[in-house]
Image (cartoon, rainbow, N blue to C red):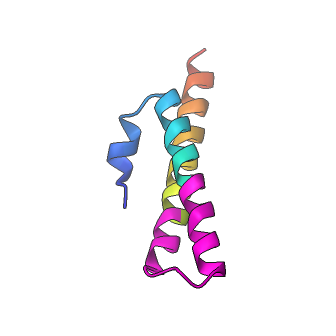
Amino acid sequence: MTKASDIRTKTADELQDELLKLKKEQFNLRFQKATGQLENTARVRQVRRDIARTKTIQAQKAASAAKAK
């Protein structure tokens, strides 16, 4: 589980990379669930929340950047 304070220190490119990594993990977890190979079911929820947390912070950074201009 990623903390919001850790995410806030990242740049926009790093946030985009993190989001891509999380989406790939989410896809793999869904695939494992469909084939009955998923062992850690709680990870699905953690990844979903990390994606939401990352998107929220991306939106906040974009809003503050637009406001600064």
Which residue is painted at 53% across and 81% down in the image?
A: 37
Q: Which residue is drawn at 40% across and 43% down?
A: 7
In magenta stretch: residue 38: yes
| Number of numbered discs visible in the structure rendering | 0
Hey, which quadrant is residue 43 in on the image? bottom left
- State whether the magenta stretch is mostly helix, strand or loop: helix
Residue that extends furthest to the bottom in the rendered view of this protein:
36
What's drawn in magenta, residue-wise? Answer: 23-47
Q: Which residue is drawn at 38% across and 50% down?
A: 4
Quick check: 52 above or below 15?
A: below
Q: Where does the image place residue 6, in percent across and percent down from the top left?
A: 33, 44
Q: Does the magenta stretch include residue 65?
A: no
Q: Where is residue 26 in the image (x, y as percent from the top left)?
A: 58, 62
In the image, is 18 to the left or to the right of 5? right
* Vertical relation: 53 (above or below) 45: above
- Position in image of residue 33 (x %, y %): 60, 79
Q: Which of 31 and 7 is in front in this view?
A: 31
From the viewer's perspective, tell me whether residue 38 is left or right of residue 6.
Answer: right
Front one among 7 and 69: 7
Q: In which quarter of the image is the N terminus?
A: bottom left
Residue shown at the point (51%, 73%) measured from the top left: 45
Q: In which quarter of the image is the C terminus?
A: top right
